[in-house]
Structures are given as C-alpha cells and as structure tokens.
Amino acid sequence: MDLQLHGKVALVTGASAGLGRAIARILAEEGCRLALLARRGRLLEELAATLPASATPLIVAEDITAPGAADRTRDAVLGHFGACDILVNNAGGSRPQSDLGPDQVWLESMELNFHAGRRMAHAFIPAMRARKFGRIVNITGQDEPHNINAANAPNGAVHIWAKALSRQLGRDGITVNSIPPGRLRSEQIDARILPTEEARRAWAEKEVPVGYIGEAEDLAVLVAFLCSPRARYITGQVIHVDGGTRRFSH
C-alpha cells in the first residue's frame, strides 16, 4: 500500500533514541522530509547520517520543556521547510515512585509529558489549518497503572486533550491520535526497567499474550499509517501497541 507520504514534512520529538528514532526512520523510508528534535544533538546528527537523502533532515537540538521551545521549533521548521504536515509528540518519560513522590516530580512530569507536547501541537496547528491537512500523533503511556507513577496522570491528560482537539480540528483535515506503547525494546526499557535478557524473557512469558517484547518498529509502523492521508477517518483514538498486555477490553 502506498501511504502517500512522499514529500510530507514531519517533526518527530524525542528522536535521538528508542521509539523516536524508529519512527523517524520509518517516516523517512516512506518519503517524508524530517525535522528531528531532541536535547542530544550529536545523536540526532548520527541518525540523520543514516537516513535517505530525500529526508533532508533538519536537526533541532532543543529541550521541549524550556521556555519558548515550541515557538522556536515552529519557526525553525516552517522557516526551513515552509510547512509541517505531521507532528509526532514522542518526547516524554516514565516517573515511577517508591512512595507518593515529591510535588516537584509530579510538576516536572506534567510539564514534560503533557504541557510540552500540547504547546508543540498548538504552535503548529495554524500552519496545518492553512494547508487543510495535518497529523498529530502522541506517544503516551499506559492508563492501567500498577503503582504510583507520576507519568500516568499526564498520559491520561493527553488522551482527554487529544480527544477534544480532534473534535475541534476534524473539519480542517487534521487528525489527532494517541498511542500508548507497552513494554517495547527501547532505551528506557532496556536500561531502567528490564535491563537483562533474562528479565525481559521472564516478564514477557508472564505478561505478554504474544510471548515476546516488541521492537520499536512495531509501534513505528502504526505511526506511519496514522500519519498517512489514507488514515483520514481515524481520529480521536487511543490505540495500544503492547502485544495484548493491557487487560481492559476498551
């Protein structure tokens, strides 16, 4: 299937590693021109060097929680490409707490996992509206918490905000969807949560119906489809990519 993404301009935040890196690579393979955003500019340069020449990557070394980051990013992307058709809000992070967690952690997590992506979307929406086309995909996290995690509340906030936004923007040709990943192979999972192959295998055997932990590409292919003009009737949705781990039926 031709996803009709050739020449579309996509901004991927948190693109330096893990899920963001895989998403950027898939979109580049589908013909997108790319803006790559993360704090670690050196890793973005390394990624850019491996992408097809048609991706003409723009490197944006930026902390999305910094004051004015959304506006600076918008100006850089629109100034370079003249448009932004796709925004993938991927930057974020889990914040598990051993007890209730200090107030500072909750505030920082809300800023990173909700407000920063919201600001980024709001900054680009006028340009998408002008072109009568846009795709906003938010990479969030589980809404079936097993313990106190300061990222769970902002994940839920993103899902509610994105649903409302999808209703506001539908007639402008802009779709808004959210993808909560399960435990996929990524920098966060491999380094912090399941650091050994034995731990990953044991967790998958117990928790994942398909019997293995997925790769970042398993999520990236869904992102590419949702960004496609062919996915025009899919909006306001929360689509889990977790190998069946989530136990809720809806």
Image (cartoon, helix red, strand yellow):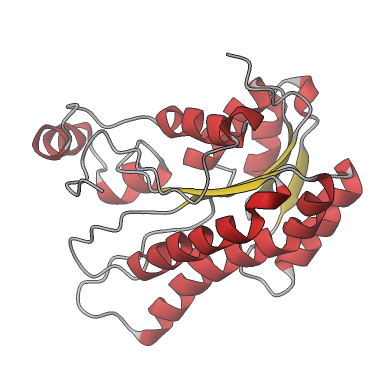
In-front residue for pair 76/193 = 76
Residue 202 lies, in percent from the top left, at 11, 35
Residue 156 lies, in percent from the top left, at 38, 64
In-front residue for pair 249/241 = 249
Above or below, comparing residue 181 to residue 226 in the picture = below
14 with respect to 68 (left or right): left
Write the residue at 65% across / 67% down: 119
Write the residue at 40% across / 77% down: 105
Q: Residue furthest top?
A: 1
72 with respect to 106 (left or right): right
Quarter occupied by residue 48: top right
Above or below, comparing residue 209 to residue 168 in the picture = above
Q: Quadrant of the N terminus?
A: top right
Q: How many marks?
A: 0
Residue 225 lies, in percent from the top left, at 54, 29
Write the residue at 85% across / 58% down: 75
106 with respect to 209 (left or right): right
In-front residue for pair 1/54 = 1
Write the residue at 23% across / 80% down: 100
Is any atom of residue 49 visible in this view? yes
Q: Residue furthest left?
A: 206
Q: Residue furthest bottom?
A: 103
Residue 68 lies, in percent from the top left, at 74, 72
Is any atom of residue 87 visible in this view? no
Q: Residue furthest front?
A: 171
